[in-house]
Amino acid sequence: MRTPNSKKHAIRADAGKLSSLFSVLAALLLPALLSGGDTEYYRHIVFDNSLTSDNYFYSYAQASSPSLIEQKDGRLPVETRWFITPPNALRLQWQSGKSGGWEAEVRVVNFRYRFPELSGRNLYLWCYSPQAIAADDLPRIMLSTTREGLQVAEFPGSFSDPLRLGKFAGDLPAARWVQVRIPLSEFRTGSIYKFRSSLVQNVLFLQGRSDGVPHTLILDEIRFDDDADGIAGSAGSFPAPQNVKAIGYDRHVEVDWEPVSDPALDRYVIYRARDGKDFQPVGIQLPGTEPEITPMLNKIGFEP
């Protein structure tokens, strides 16, 4: 998969030589957030994957009858079968009824020392649906600079007017990932305050046409970025990481490798195989995530 200005590299480790199938450690990205991870990465990312496998903590979903939206504890469910950034994505499953409504929010992840502004001229998101969805049946999309949707009680909270996602995505084909690009200049303020896209804290999806038909839309890698320049996201443009090794412990396995020295590297994609042949993507890790005990190595953990 290709994304604008974001390059990645694949790391493969044969976990079958160590034990049976390992599941991805739910908090594998937490060290990247709290230590010396690539802070530039988080100037672009709204969502890449969920630390929990049932619902996404930094989300919200609600509906008013007769419309429906799938939610778990008021949050969007996590999709583990189809994704761009392993090991999961978000699932938007709705049914739009007349005189009803629904909304779903994907909030920017908050953590200490995160740079307060997003960078980029476009909003990008990957979309996938098991069944084709006509452009007119896709939801509307809007942006908010608050984490509570349309609650803008205090300055400078603001939000944009909603746009039709179908205007930019077109008719969505069945069982195929499509990257949607929306210029941020398309989002005009819908509140009494000036809307600044760099301060966005929330991406909202709203009911569109009331067709009364159930739809499922998988969303992944929601990010702000500039226009793509040439071919990006190709692992083949980087040298293979050296000295990849997996270390087994009682309850987890750690995979280490020597980092690739390239400022254009956006992230590593981690693959796993039980038989040394059928490698499947199971997680991502950021450049610059260096444990204190092994300062020259990148690291990712797996838990049985």
Image (cartoon, grey):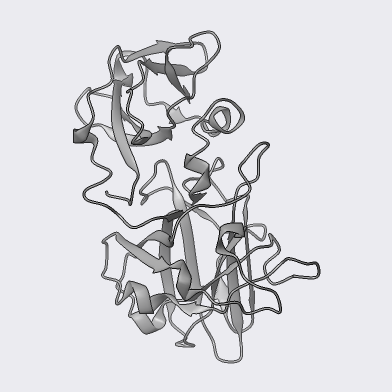
Left or right of residue 17: residue 151: right
Pinpoint residue 294: horizontal percent, then vertical percent: 48, 9
Outermost residue, right side: 154
- Which of 167/249 is in front? 167
Image height of 199 relative to 251, above or below: below
Q: Quadrant of residue 30?
A: top right
Image height of 79 relative to 263, above or below: below
Left or right of residue 232: residue 300: right
- Residue in the image at 34% along x and 72% along y: 169
Pinpoint residue 24: horizontal percent, then vertical percent: 46, 31
Image height of 236 relative to 172, above or below: above
Left or right of residue 55: residue 257: left
Pinpoint residue 166: horizontal percent, then vertical percent: 38, 77
Pinpoint residue 238: horizontal percent, then vertical percent: 23, 30
Number of marks: 0
- Which of 82/105 is in front? 105
Q: Quadrant of residue 215?
A: bottom left
- Report whether residue 273 is seen: no
- Report whether residue 187 is seen: yes
Outermost residue, top side: 293
- Residue in the image at 37% along x and 50% along y: 83
